[in-house]
Image: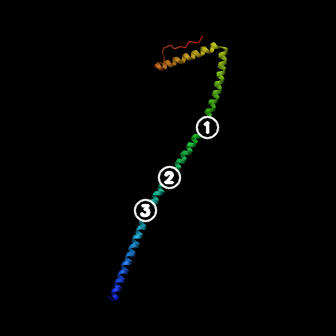
């Protein structure tokens, strides 16, 4: 084996190692490009999802604001109605006191009006129950002696 045979084997080894190294670089570059494409695709997907979440959050915040305003308005109306109910309760209590005074002073007058009103309500209930507006059923309450 001479010098030329060793040189040939070295040249072949050098060529094979160079081709292997170039193949390795090409494979590595292809893997990097593929990973870059996957990352770019994932990034676009995540960006779209992020925008959708931001839009949803903005919509939810708007709905919360509207709900808060509706609650404040409802609380305001409740307060108004509560004040009106309290005023009516005072008014009814005063009326009840006056009615009690009148019943004490003129018992026949108050009892007759209460009896007439009760009879009228009973006739209305009877006609509503029978389905006839002009029911002839006579339901009366007799005044107490």
Above or below for 54 versus 83: below
| Circles 2 and 1: CB atoms closer than 8 Å | no
Assess disc 2: are there few (<14), some (14-19) or many (≥20) residues with their C-alpha within 10 Å of its C-alpha: few
- Rounded to the nearest angstrom, the CA distance separating label 1 from label 3 is 56 Å
Q: Is mark 1 on a helix, strand or loop?
A: helix
Residues at marks 2 and 1, CA–CA distance in whole angstroms: 34 Å
According to the image, label 3 marks what residue? 38
Q: In which quarter of the image is residue 92?
A: top right
| Inter-mark Cα distance, 2 to 3 | 22 Å
Mark 3, secondary structure of its residue: helix
Instruction: Give the left or right position of residue 133, taking residue 4 as reference.
Output: right
Q: Where is residue 123 in the image (x, y as percent from the top left)?
A: 51, 17
Which callout, 1 or 3, points to the residue nearer the camera? 3
Q: Residue at x 61, y 14 (%)?
A: 111
Q: Going by the image, does 103 lie left or right of 56?
A: right
Residue 72: image x %, image y %?
59, 40
Residue drawn at x 34%, y 84% is 8
Identify residue for label 2.
53
The residue beneath circle 1 is 76
Provide residue 64's location: percent of width, then percent of height.
Answer: 55, 45
Point out the residue furthest to the left here.
1
Please rate how many residues cluster around mark 1, counting C-alpha atoms within 10 Å: few if below 14, some from 14 to 19, many from 20. Answer: few
Position of the N terminus by quadrant:
bottom left
């Amino acid at each position: 084996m001479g010098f030329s045979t060793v040189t040939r084997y070295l040249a072949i080894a050098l060529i094979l190692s160079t081709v292997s190294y170039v193949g390795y670089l090409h494979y590595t570059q292809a893997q990097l490009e593929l990973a870059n494409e996957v990352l770019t695709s994932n990034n676009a997907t995540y960006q779209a999802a992020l925008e959708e979440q931001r839009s949803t959050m903005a919509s939810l915040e708007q709905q919360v604001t509207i709900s808060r305003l509706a609650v404040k308005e409802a609380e305001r109306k409740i307060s108004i109605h509560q004040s009106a109910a309290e005023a009516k309760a005072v008014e009814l209590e005063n009326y009840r006191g006056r009615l009690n005074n009148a019943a004490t002073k003129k018992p026949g007058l108050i009892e007759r009006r209460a009896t007439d009103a009760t009879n009228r309500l009973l006739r209305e209930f009877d006609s509503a129950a029978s389905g006839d507006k002009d029911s002839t059923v006579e339901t009366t309450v007799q005044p107490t002696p």
